[in-house]
Image (tube, helix red, strand yellow):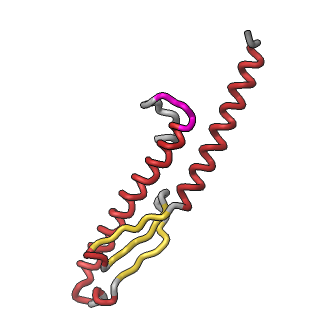
Amino acid sequence: MKSMEEMLQAAQQAAETIQKQMNEAQAKLDSLEVEGVSGGGLVKIRCTAKGRILGVSIDDSLIVPADKQMLEDLVTAAFNDARAKADRVANDEMGKMQQGLGLPPGFNFPGLG
């Protein structure tokens, strides 16, 4: 039977391992890119799985002063599309990490979703 000190040391090591894996997962999420689109591809927004916007692309055909409101609506729709995709990628990645830790399904470890 392990002593209490050995059990506490093992728990501390496990916590450090989990923290390291969490940091690695967060860094990976910031390197994964998704693209949101609207208007049949006329407006595109690239962002990371953490939601950091990397770029916006607007087709030249949309740059007409009279279409300003439509352009703003398309940019909003593209951003929301990218954000939804980023959330799915982030959840998938965090789920993979959680499975790798051997945690039971539904276990709500802070930061794992």
Q: Residue at x 37, y 74 (%)?
A: 44
For the point 40% across and 52% down, which residue is it? 88
Could you tell whether 44 is left or right of 7 in the image? left
Residue at 47% from the left image edge and 32% from the top image edge: 108
104 vs 9, left or right, is left
Q: Residue at x 44, y 30 (%)?
A: 105
In the rendered image, residue 58, in percent from the top left (x then y), is placed at 36, 82
Q: Reply above or below: 47 against 101.
A: below
Residue 56 shown in magenta: no
**Residue furthest toward the top?**
1
Compared across the picture, whether 8 is left or right of 69 comes to: right
Q: Where in the figure is residue 95, as x and y percent of width and height? A: 47, 42
Q: Is residue 102 magenta?
A: yes
Q: How many marks?
A: 0
Q: Which residues are magenta?
A: 100-104
Compared to residue 35, the image places residue 7 above or below, namely: above
- Quarter-of-image position of residue 15: top right
Place residue 16 in its image quadrant: top right
Quadrant containing the N terminus is top right
Q: Is residue 101 positioned above or below 74 on the image?
A: above
Residue 71 lies, in percent from the top left, at 28, 79
Please state which of residues 60 and 21 is positioned toward the viewer in this rendering. 21
In terms of secondary structure, what is the magenta stretch mainly? loop
Q: Where is residue 106, by image quadrant?
A: top left
Residue 40 place in picture, x, y as percent: 26, 75
**Residue 81 position (above or below residue 110):** below
